[in-house]
Image (cartoon, coloured by chain):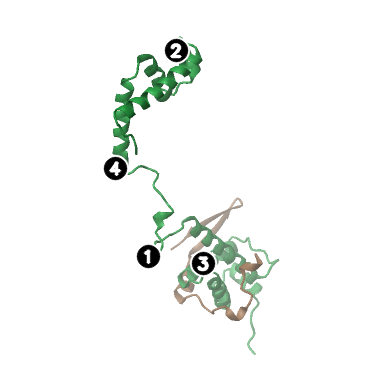
Amino acid sequence: MELQIADSLLIQNYINGDERALETLIRRHNQRLSSFIYSKVNDREITEDIFQDTFIKVIRTLKKGRYNEEGKFLPWVMRIAHNLIIDHFRKNRRLPYFEGSNTFDIFSIIHDEKLNIEKQLIKEQIDEDLVLLIEELPKDQRDVLVMRMYKDMSFKEISENTGVSINTALGRMRYALINLRKIIEDNNIVLTN
Amino acid sequence: MGKFYVEDKNKIKKVEAKKETIDFLLNYSKSLKIDKINGVAYESNLN
């Protein structure tokens, strides 16, 4: 029957400078740890990476003398691997990957909020036409509409600026809109996007 | 957390890390030097 040196003794030997002790530890727990990682990530390359990162942490901790023998070596190593597996999944969740198929178009659920070039041109044309229509309004109505719609002033500010009451400003705005609609209808103008 | 682990151990596929990975770790360990100066650990890699 072959005698197996305890993990704790191997760790002590390694801390004291015996590099072969580390090799024994890695080979002893290789299959158990690799299989554990693989069972979670289901990918050989990722398993290899996590296995490597796990032992790099083990090596650094042991060499820094920060390992305490309270727990067993293997559960400690498994815990490190477990945390690295979680990190791996977190990292992947931050970078979701979507792909369309014959039955699913990814652009059916994601949109570009900006107008396309055609709609942008139409919008610019409408804005220009609207400016020309506003020019047709009587001056008092035009001033109120411009201050409200283009300068974003409140009716109180418009009232103070034009020297009329708020009610008069509201009335001028109302007539400005009525007259604008009338001009549009009379001239069969279509403003749409 | 419990659900994270596979209950049936027979379902776990047995895999092992490659020889190159183990060699890398052994070389990394040999080249890693840690000096403690005034309680602060300084790492250096002699590779």
Taking the spot 51% from the left edge, 77% from the top edge, the residue there is: B16
Quarter-wise, where is residue A178 in the image? top left
Mark 3 or mark 1: name the one nearer the start of the chain: 3
Disc 3 to disc 2, how far (Cα)? Answer: 71 Å
Residue A130 appearing in the image: no
Chain given the colour green: A
Q: Please identify the residue farthest to the top as the structure is shown.
A: A163
- Label 2, on which residue? A161
User: Mark 4 is on which residue type?
Assistant: Glu
Task: Say whether disc 3 or disc 2 marks the residue closer to the N-terminus.
Answer: 3
Q: Which residue is mark 1?
A: A102
Locate residue A14, reporting x and y percent: 59, 70
Dot 1 amino acid type = Asn
- At a point 52% along the width and 57% down the height, the residue shown is B43
Instruction: Report the front residue among B38 and A168.
Output: A168
Q: Amino acid at mark 3?
A: Ile
Is A5 left, or right, of A110 in this rendering? Answer: right
Q: Nearer the viewer, residue A5 or A123?
A: A123
Provide the secondary structure element on which disc 3 rests.
Answer: helix
Q: Chain of mark 1?
A: A
Mark pair 4, 3: CA separation: 51 Å
In the rendered image, the quadrant that contains the C terminus of chain B is bottom left
Marking on residue A50: 3
Chain identifier for the brown-coloured part of the image: B
Upstream in the sequence, badge 4 or badge 1? 1
Circles 2 and 1 on the same chain:
yes
